[in-house]
Amino acid sequence: MGRLNKKRSSVRLVPIVVAIVLLCCTVLLLVFGDLGRFALGPCTAGREGAAEGVSGGAKELLETRNFEASPRAIEDLKGGVVDERLVATLQTIANAHRICVDAFKAGHYFLPGVPDGPLIPDGYPDAGLSNTHYYGRAVDIRRVDGKPVRGNGTDPHVLDIGDIISRIPPQERPDQIIGPEDWVKALGGSSEEGWILNEDELEHHKDHIHLGYIKKDGTWNTR
Ligand SMILES: [Zn+2]
């Protein structure tokens, strides 16, 4: 009698065990799926229909599969905050490489927790100069073809981004081109061509490529 009961209860346990296993699998999937996303950062790829109500270059960029961006960067593009020259430059790059843009204006901080203003704050190289992020004239690219910029300054894909930028005509090329030191040195661009070469600035750009336009109209490259 006892044995029969045992058999019955173990048969009854089967669906419970199956349910627990399924539950565990779901939890693991959720946790690791999210962790994976956190590790990679929030990057949403461009797609058809992503630019509802948006026109021009920003629309094209938002619908380019190779163009990935954080939610705040996408909002800036949709809101018309981003300078057209910068949009065009990013389109040129995204035509050849998959890039992830972290920030234009929204959510860019020079000092942690302190909202950016129109000028670069004290404690930063070039403090007091115009903050191109604030005016929607700068972008930070964190990833190229799925690889982080940090530690990959001499990766052929990351270097090719620099080559592509170099080939943009001076009047359209960003006049703030900054990135990891090995990236900048390997590409060999000059400050007359828009590259920022001072050590202090390079120190702040180990993990991203910053492209910016100093002036509202025209570029310093045509001085
Ligand atoms: Zn920047």
Image (tube, helix red, strand yellow):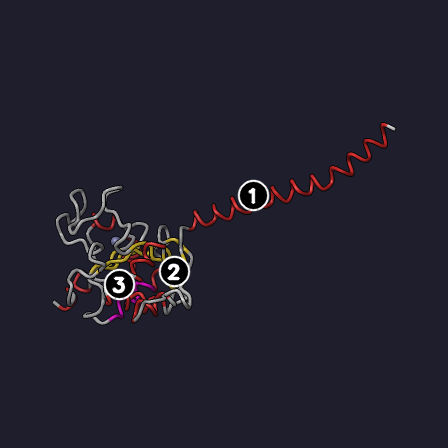
Residue 52 placement (x, y as % from top left): 36, 66
Name the mark nearer the viewer: 2 or 1.
1
**Quarter of the view holding residue 8:** top right
SS of the residue at dot 3? loop
Depth order, front residue of 164/41: 41
Q: Magenta stretch containing residue 60, yes or no?
A: no
Which badge, 2 or 3, is on the more N-terminal residue? Answer: 2
Q: Residues within 10 Å of mark 1 (few under 14, many from 20)?
A: few
Residue 124 placement (x, y as % from top left): 19, 45
SS of the residue at dot 2? strand
SS of the residue at dot 1? helix
The residue singled out by tag 1 in the image is 27
**In the image, residue 43 above or below residue 66:** above
C-alpha separation, residue under disc 1 versus residue under disc 3: 40 Å
Work out which residue is located at the far top of the displayed protein and give it: 2
Identified at 51% across, 48% down, the residue is 33
Q: Which residues are magenta?
A: 161-168
The residue singled out by tag 3 in the image is 80
Which badge, 2 or 1, is on the more N-terminal residue? Answer: 1
**Quarter of the view holding residue 158:** bottom left
Identified at 30% across, 49% down, the residue is 206
Identified at 28% across, 50% down, the residue is 107
The residue singled out by tag 2 in the image is 68
Work out which residue is located at the far front of the displayed protein and give it: 53
